[in-house]
Amino acid sequence: MFADLHLHTSFSDGTYTPEELAARGKSLGLAAMALTDHDTVEGCARMAAACAAAGIEFLTGTELTAEFNGNEVHVLAYGIDLGNPRFLSEVARFQAVRRDRIQEMVARLNTLGIPLEANAVFAIANCRSPGRPHVARALVQAGLCASLEEAFERFLKVNRPAWVPKCKMSALEAIQLIQQAGGVAVVAHPGLNRTDLIIGQLVEAGLDGIECFHSKHTAPTVQHYLEIADRYRLVVTGGSDCHGLSKGKPLVGSVKLPYHYFEKLKEHVAARRARSLLRKPAAQAQNGVAHAI
Ligand code: AMP
Ligand code: ZN
Ligand code: FE
Ligand code: FE
């Protein structure tokens, strides 16, 4: 039995709907899935229903963009209370920043003589959490770039002319925000960011887990982070980070997290939610784990 706990849908920059993703999960025989759209939990209700219908366990989630010492750090939030007011208002703020950032990226493209309109990007994104992949798709659709890769290479990658930094919260604040919402905080794809030097400080701030298994981690990288997880007693997670097709194939299920890691994560979520429920009135508690617990 396997899980894929890092997935994006059309509620952020993925191309599958929650229903399409759950259907893929079912045909691959996945036992559990979690949704980790960027800076939103909007797709979780539909994904929970689709997974329940497909007989797949589901855990709510999101992937927050944070920073630490000037480096981008992605923090996965699992099992959060979908009705937590502070969490929802912070995420809404992140989404507003994302929309302003699209306007700024388009303005920079216009300055470079590229006649893209912000509305074309928003129409393609069709969600509250637009990002650079939507700008890239709009550039391709308008015939202004031949491919998504070209759009990133010429304009959108870090330090390219249309790249705009995101206003980010510190990873320490992100951990706190997730935990007060009854969630478990996991550092995403540490092999892709310069995370090793800061992991001790994140652990001190209460970090719960580390994403050892990821589609862009090599086998030695996985081993390295499993050792780090062991050293700091962190929960181990993993997922494909599927955004749809990758090199013509769906990425979902390409990382198969052994089910016993998912069980440990569920135990952590249950313990965190029990603690956070003690701290607030029952009326505020909502379904964080729609199907799994
Ligand atoms: P954003 O959150 O707007 O900064 O966009 C980040 C997303 O863009 C990532 O999650 C990837 O899906 C995608 N991305 C980042 N770099 C590249 C790249 N070089 N080529 C294609 N997609 C990329
Ligand atoms: Zn993405
Ligand atoms: Fe990420
Ligand atoms: Fe991701």
Image (cartoon, rainbow, N blue to C red):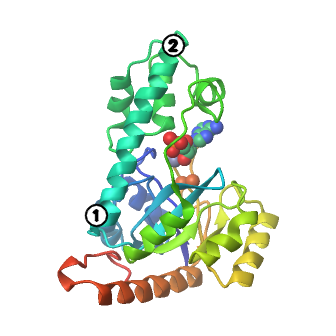
Q: Quadrant of the N terminus?
A: bottom right
Q: From the image, tell me which residue sits under label 2.
A: 111
Mark yes or no: residue 292 visible: yes
Percent x, y of residue 171: 56, 62
Residue at figure coordinates x 51%, y 85% from the top left:
263
Residue at mark 1 to residue at mark 2: CA–CA distance: 41 Å
The amino acid marked with disc number 1 is Ala
Q: Tell me the quarter of the picture where residue 273 sits.
A: bottom left
Amino acid on which disc 2 is placed: Thr
Q: Residue at x 56, y 74 (%)?
A: 2
| Location of residue 55 (image quadrant) | bottom left
| Residue position for label 1 | 45
- First along the sequence among labels 1 and 2: 1
**Residue that sits furthest to the left in the current view:** 283
Say which of marks 1 and 2 sits in front.
Answer: 2
Image position, residue 275 (x, y; %): 38, 89
SS category of the residue bearing label 2? helix
Q: Residue 49: horizontal and vertical position, in percent?
A: 28, 67
Secondary structure of residue under mark 1: helix
Label 2: few (<14), some (14–19) or many (≥20) C-alpha neighbours in 10 Å: few
Q: Residues within 10 Å of mark 1 (few under 14, many from 20)?
A: some
Q: Residue at x 47, y 71 (%)?
A: 176
Seen in the picture, residue 144 relative to 7 is either above or below; the reply is above
Which circle marks residue 118 in the picture? none
Q: Is residue 60 above or below residue 68?
A: below
Near-viewer residue (205 or 144): 205
57 sits left or right of 286 in the view: right
Location of residue 144 in the rendering, given as x and y in whole percent from the top left corner: 52, 15
